[in-house]
Image (cartoon, helix red, strand yellow):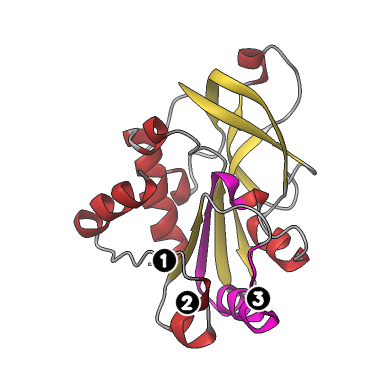
Amino acid sequence: TAREVMNTLAGPNGFLVTMTEDLGSISTDRLANTDVIMFALTSGELPFTPAQRNALIDAVNGGKGFVGVHSATDTLYEFPDYGRLVGAYFKEHPWTQQARVIPEDLAHPATGLIRDAFTLEEEFYTFRENPRGRVQVLLRLDPVSVNTTGDYPLAWAQSFGSGRSYYNALGHFSATWRDTRFQNQLIAAIRWAANK
């Protein structure tokens, strides 16, 4: 579904998407011709070589954009620079249910057209460390909607060297990828991360 949605969004929104599960495509040469690198639903310790790890970090640090979606925070735990790039590492998903999402920073371009709180069914994440303070939180979970208290950021943006990084914890279900609110967030995030 993520592939289908990204292909559908690309043309009308003025960007070209190249999708791959070939980790060999992560290289300095390939990334030189890429404006935004997206990790959508990645997981685990991807077998990147040290040169590939450096290529990823150097690309964003040098001015490229990065967009991580959902389990992108459940990826590359043994690569601390990636943890800084994505903004946090996954801890658990204690709530898979309908819950309320609150937009926190309406002025940030990567928030997209979201202006009001909305409810959706999702696998809601918590993180090993709350990224607030290191990143600009754009969306957060309403804790009351899951019968708890606390601060649960769900989407954020940050500068990374000369580049930009955006992460959105939503996106577990196909229905989320087909939700126009989520799609609008991704379009806005890609544009912002590309600095275009």
Mark 2 = which residue? Answer: 25
Residue 140 in the image, given as x and y percentages of width and height: 60, 32
Residue 31 bears which disc, if any? none
Q: Amino acid at mark 3?
A: Arg
> Dot 2, how many residues are within 10 Å of its Cα: few (below 14), some (14-19), or many (20+)?
few
Label 2 and label 1: CA atoms lie apart by 8 Å
59 or 92: nearer the eye?
92
User: Residue at the location (59% across, 74% down)?
Assistant: 56
Label 1 and label 3: CA atoms lie apart by 17 Å
Residue 3 in the image, given as x and y percentages of width and height: 35, 52
Assign a secondary structure to mark 3: helix
Indicate whether 91 appears above or below 49. Answer: above
Mark 1 = which residue? Answer: 20
Mark 3 = which residue? Answer: 53
- The answer to the question of whether label 1 and label 3 lie on touching residues, with beta carbons closer than 8 A, is no
Indicate whether 162 appears above or below 141. Answer: below
User: Quadrant location of the C terminus?
Assistant: bottom left
Residue 95 placement: quadrant: top right
> Dot 1, how many residues are within 10 Å of its Cα: few (below 14), some (14-19), or many (20+)?
few
Assign a secondary structure to mark 1: loop
> Dot 3, how many residues are within 10 Å of its Cα: few (below 14), some (14-19), or many (20+)?
many
User: Nearer the N terminus, badge 3 or badge 2?
Assistant: 2
Magenta segment includes 107: no
- Give the magenta range: 46-72
User: Residue at the location (54% across, 20% down)?
Assistant: 100
User: Nearer the N terminus, badge 2 or badge 1?
Assistant: 1
Q: Is residue 177 left or right of residue 43?
A: left
Q: Amino acid at mark 2?
A: Ser
